[in-house]
Image (tube, helix red, strand yellow):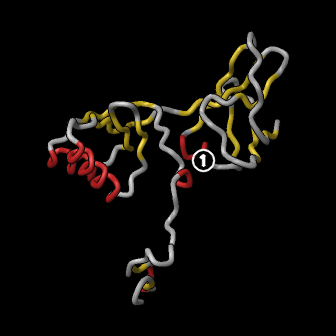
Amino acid sequence: MPIIENAIEPVPGLKRVFIEVDRFQLQKCRFRCKAKDGMDFAFALGSPLKNGNCVYKTATHCYELRQLREKVVRIELPGSSSKIAQLAWQIGNLHQPVDVRETFLLVADDPALRRILKKGGFKFKIITDTFTPAAHSAFASHQHVPGLEYQHSHIFGISHGAGA
């Protein structure tokens, strides 16, 4: 069984064989799975791979990761900035990952989200698509800046900030 440590450059002309994985497997660095032709693979990665990465090749085949499609909510972006802000707040309040596209958002299907969207009058539909939200670590983290802090608490009742 090949042990995959990183992606490799695909070779044009080789037959593609897909290794189907869900988005949760793509976030991992260690996992095992089978390609469509039955070949087993073990992954021992330094960092997660992406949909479409070539990970192994033979003289005739290139083995490529293919993310499985899943049920998602496609939300059309409203025309006004205040409605976009409201939508962003509602989704963020549910702590849902978001796949941001040019004119719409994709969010994992969730009954609570659908209720909020209906109540808010947002245009949406349930579809099946490849869901690729940005990694949580791709965004700025919570920081404490002297002079700009405000009173707030974290879990377990620990408070800090100006005047804490």
**Residue 16 % position (x, y):** 69, 18
Query: Three-letter amino acid code at disc 1?
Result: Gln
The residue at which mark 1 appears reads as: 27
State the residue in front, 129 or 133.
Answer: 133
The image quarter in which residue 78 lies: top left
Instruction: State the residue lying farthest toward the front.
Output: 147
Seen at 32% across and 59% down, the residue is: 93
**Residue 109 % position (x, y):** 34, 43
**Residue 91 % position (x, y):** 32, 52
Q: Is residue 154 above or below residue 45?
A: below
The reply, left or right, for residue 12 in relation to residue 90 is: right
Location of the N terminus by quadrant is: top right
State the residue in front, 83 or 69.
Answer: 83
The reply, left or right, for residue 61 in relation to residue 113 is: right
The image quarter in which residue 34 lies: top right
- Callout 1: SS: loop
